[in-house]
Image (tube, rainbow, N blue to C red):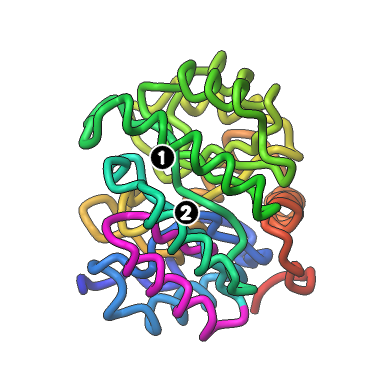
Amino acid sequence: MEKNFGTERIAAAAVPSGGLPPLVDTHCHLADRKLQADAVALIARAEAAGVRVIVSVGAIGSIQTDRDTVAIAERHDNIYAVIGVHPHDAASCDTRRLDEVRELAGSKKVVAIGETGMDLHYQNSTRQAQEESLRRHLRLANELSLPVVIHCREAEPMVAAVVKEEGMPAAGGAVHCFTGTTEDALRFLALGFYISFSGIITFKNAGSLRETARIIPDNRLLVETDAPYLTPEPNRGRHNEPAYVALTFGALARLRNTLPSALAAQIMTNAAALFRFKPPPAGLAA
């Protein structure tokens, strides 16, 4: 894997005072082939950068990705798993696949169903297949009393309409890597979703997204890497990793003009409430 920047630079960029409060990466892909072989080192670097909790998502590709994701989570106290079928693979979301997801969800480390939703930018599966997969995931999340994690690209009104028709899972949900408009964000907030921001908010051409990130209520805000994708500045061009959530968090704290320690505590509280894990002890990381 490519050379990393080091936790000292990450910490300095995220929190000018030099001390990182406990952080959470609410969405990454540790079982992705770009990260899996280096997972132990990635987790250690995240810990050193102040990232105390990682939520790792399977979903992409075959059911083996979900199995590998759960296995990683079960080996680490501070890592949790989300399992399901990605919208790109919605054509494979049949009864058998969902039965396999249901069985895997028996692990105590599985904290949500997803990522599901709709992606009308790539449309690797048909719009009809994506919508049906989304509906099945919403029903499964409700059946298992788990929250749902939504992937949405260029389909925000449609996804919101499907959720409204099917009903929001009782355990809630999050829209990960939000890239829609402020109107879209308000629509998802009205349904009860948390809104999660990735390294995209650090990109030069993401001015409108930064404006939306400023207005999300504190108690509905999450932050993520989506590693190995969407590496934040100044590390673009490298594989993303959970440690880099500190960079996105720092950008979020600055644009919201918020005390980093207070924002970190709020985001950790939000993530713990949604994914139902015990938050780590408060206090600055060493």
Numbered-mark total:
2
CB atoms at circles 1 and 2 under 8 Å apart? yes
Give the class, few, some or many, for how many residues have Cα within 10 Å of label 1's Cα (few <14, many ≥20): many
Q: The disc labelled 1 sits on which kind of residue? A: Thr
**Does the stretch in magenta take in 100?**
no
Q: Where residue 124 appears, x then y in whole percent?
A: 21, 36
Q: Up-down: is 37 above or below 30?
A: below
Q: Quadrant of the N terminus?
A: bottom left
Residue 137 falls left or right of residue 42: right
Looking at the rendered structure, the secondary structure element under dot 1 is helix
Residue at numbered disc 1: 202
Residue that protrudes farthest toward the front in the picture? 95
Q: Where residue 220 appears, x then y in whole percent?
A: 70, 38
Residue 256 falls left or right of residue 60: right
Residue at numbered disc 2: 247
Q: The disc labelled 2 sits on which kind of residue? A: Leu
Magenta highlight range:
55-77
Q: Up-down: is 203 above or below 141?
A: above
- Mark earlier in primary sequence (1, 2): 1
Residue 48 falls left or right of residue 2: right
Write the residue at 24% across / 59% down: 238
**Does the stretch in magenta take in 67?**
yes
Residue 15 falls left or right of residue 1: right
Q: Where residue 113 appears, x then y in whole percent?
A: 54, 52
> Foreground residue, 278 or 140?
140
> Foreground residue, 160 or 263?
160
Query: How far is mark 1 from mark 2, CA to CA?
Result: 9 Å
